[in-house]
Image: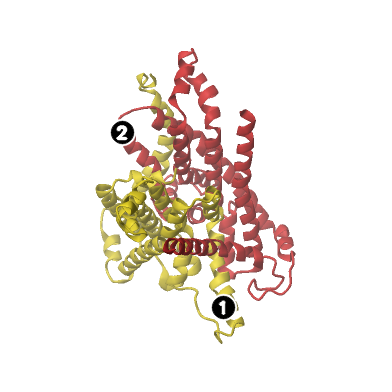
């Protein structure tokens, strides 16, 4: 009897935590339909007015384009350098392996402001102006550890024997990678790209240091808008971002499952 | 078989290592070097080796209190995420629901939502015209809106919103790793449910608890956004001061010194943790 009661308390507590986690997200979406000037409660009416405004706001559209391009390029670049590194860590033994692995994962632990300042200082020393390239490089440094973690985890679970079989059957190491390891690794590559895209897409702190007026991203734009007031337009923009960033991983997960089913 | 070619791992690693060396290691060294430089009254940075920037930091209580506040807020974030995270993690580990994986994915879903949106939305909830005040006023429980925003509490809401999934995952991984026969064994030896938890499950979950706590502390100590969006000037933390000095007043040497102190704090904590508990646990839960 007591056991049942304890368990239902645990369940109740967990539900409360869910509510607490989702409340801010739900409220943004609800308030984005508020037709009033100030995006607050009580809501009077329901309208898509702010969404319409959003699509006519040139600077926001620009920021969106910047974010998409930056996120995509970051995802491609980071995965391209992350996968070989993950291969090295999981498939080979070499001196200093653990130290190097820790070094490559370190950016997770380093505060973003420090990353922001350091790269900017370096640029200053090189006497280069801020540019899109700086943002891209910065975002790659920021997202590389996450790609490494995801790909390494997947590699551990791929049995060595597949690769060894391919090698004994006469395939070279590159061919083995291309025809055995890579297809098995596809879900991890997708996950890594998704991860780095979304981290890049969401980043504010470091991007505030690196962005120029021309290369503003959506979150940086939201941050600037928040300086004035929390307007319904920000809520609408937030709602669009929520739908986008949540649907991308869900869609990718769905596609990956369908894709792998077809392979079997 | 593959190990024979010893140059191969280095070839595979070279792009990542080159990138990290030039864009992380070297720039970080720059910050350290810069923290000893002088700033001329004209605004120029003069190469030097002097401790003036650090002396300035500790000259009066203003900057050290910022450091202490950063440590306090980070510890509060750890305590709050433990309080809010342990029970859900326990629930995920013990539930027999068919939808277990769905439930875990669901709690991680907010993680994909832009942090700035989640942080800003606490204004919608805690503000004078926000959700909570609206409900309380409607129910006539209060006659004037409660002031809940722009204090340390609201900063913590935003911060823990971001950090809780890290804590839950770490504890969950640790709980999942416990031998499923141990609790029934303890109970058959006469333990009550609570005793079995206290004597068996809780101690065995401590690696996850400590790994989660470290991660939350480190991420909270370096935080910039929540104090900016949900706090007032009295809630500024170290990261905010770095930004203010570097971007606001263009005082690069002093901004660098604050960065080094912040980095030192985090380095110290990570070092101590690694010394006594081992760092590898941290990255385990992320996979």
Residue B236 numbered tag: none
Neighbourhood count class around disc 2 (C-alpha, 10 Å): few under 14, some 14–19, many 20 upward = few
The residue identified by callout 1 is B133
Q: Residues within 10 Å of mark 1 (few under 14, many from 20)?
A: many
Task: Say which chain tag 2 marks.
Answer: A
Q: Which residue is mark 2?
A: A96
Please identify which colour was used for chain B in the image.
yellow
- Residue A39 in sight in this render: yes
**Whole-percent x, y for residue B264 in the image:** 30, 54
Q: Residue at x 54, y 52 (%)?
A: B103
Asked if one can make out residue B38 in the rendered structure from this viewpoint, the answer is no
B125 horizontally vs A42: left or right: left
Chain A representation colour = red
Could you tell me if the residues under marks 2 and 1 are in contact, i.e. CB atoms within 8 Å?
no
Q: CA distance from mark 2 to mark 1?
A: 57 Å
Location of residue A11 in the rendering, given as x and y in whole percent from the top left corner? 49, 61
What is the secondary structure assignment of the residue under circle 1? helix
Residue A52: x %, y % from top left:
74, 61
Q: Is residue A115 above or below residue A78?
A: below
């Amino acid at each position: 009897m007591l056991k049942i009661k304890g368990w239902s308390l645990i369940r109740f507590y967990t539900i409360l935590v869910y509510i607490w986690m989702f409340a801010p997200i739900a409220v943004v979406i609800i308030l984005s339909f508020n037709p009033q000037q100030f995006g607050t409660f009580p809501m009077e009416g329901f309208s898509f007015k702010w969404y319409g405004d959003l699509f006519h706001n040139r600077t926001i559209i620009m920021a969106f384009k910047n974010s998409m391009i930056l996120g995509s390029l970051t995802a491609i670049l980071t995965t391209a350098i992350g996968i070989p590194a993950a291969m090295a860590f999981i498939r080979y033994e070499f001196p200093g392996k653990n130290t190097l692995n820790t070094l490559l994962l370190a950016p997770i632990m380093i505060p973003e402001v420090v990353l922001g300042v350091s790269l900017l200082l370096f640029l200053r020393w090189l006497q280069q102006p801020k540019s899109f390239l700086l943002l891209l490089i910065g975002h790659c440094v920021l997202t590389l550890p996450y790609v490494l973690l995801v790909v390494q985890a997947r590699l551990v679970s791929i049995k060595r024997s597949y690769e060894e079989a391919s090698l004994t059957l006469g395939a070279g190491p590159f061919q083995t990678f291309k025809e055995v390891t890579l297809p098995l690794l596809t879900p991890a590559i997708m996950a890594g790209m998704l991860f780095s895209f979304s981290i890049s897409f969401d980043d504010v702190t470091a991007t505030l240091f690196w962005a120029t007026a021309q290369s503003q991203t959506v979150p940086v734009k939201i941050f600037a808008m928040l300086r004035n007031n929390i307007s319904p337009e920000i809520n609408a923009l937030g709602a669009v971002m929520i739908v986008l960033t949540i649907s991308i991983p869900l869609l990718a997960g769905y596609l990956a499952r369908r894709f792998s089913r077809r392979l079997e | 078989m593959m190990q024979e070619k010893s140059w191969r791992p280095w070839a595979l690693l070279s792009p990542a290592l080159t990138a990290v060396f030039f864009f992380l290691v070297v720039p970080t060294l720059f910050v350290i070097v810069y923290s000893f430089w002088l700033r001329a009254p004209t605004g120029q940075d003069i190469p030097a080796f002097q401790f003036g920037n650090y002396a300035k930091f500790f000259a009066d209580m203003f900057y050290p209190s910022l450091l202490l506040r950063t440590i306090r807020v980070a510890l509060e974030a750890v305590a709050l995420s433990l309080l809010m995270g342990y029970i859900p993690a326990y629930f995920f580990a013990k539930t027999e629901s068919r939808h277990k994986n769905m439930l875990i994915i669901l709690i991680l879903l907010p993680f994909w939502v832009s942090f700035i949106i989640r942080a800003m939305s606490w204004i919608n909830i805690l503000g004078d015209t926000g959700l909570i005040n609206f409900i309380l006023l409607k129910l006539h429980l209060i006659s004037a809106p409660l002031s809940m925003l722009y204090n340390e509490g609201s900063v913590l809401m935003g911060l823990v919103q971001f950090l809780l999934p890290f804590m839950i995952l770490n504890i969950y991984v640790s709980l999942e790793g416990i031998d499923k026969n141990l609790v029934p064994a303890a109970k058959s030896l006469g333990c009550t449910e609570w005793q079995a938890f206290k004597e068996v499950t809780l101690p065995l979950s401590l690696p996850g608890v400590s790994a989660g706590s470290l991660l939350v502390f480190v991420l909270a100590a370096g935080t910039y956004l929540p104090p900016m969006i949900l706090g007032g000037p009295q809630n500024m933390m170290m990261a905010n001061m770095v930004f203010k000095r570097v971007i606001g007043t263009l005082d690069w040497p002093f901004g660098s010194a604050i960065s080094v102190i912040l980095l030192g704090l985090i380095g110290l904590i990570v070092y101590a943790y690694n010394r006594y508990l081992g760092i590898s646990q941290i990255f385990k839960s992320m996979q």
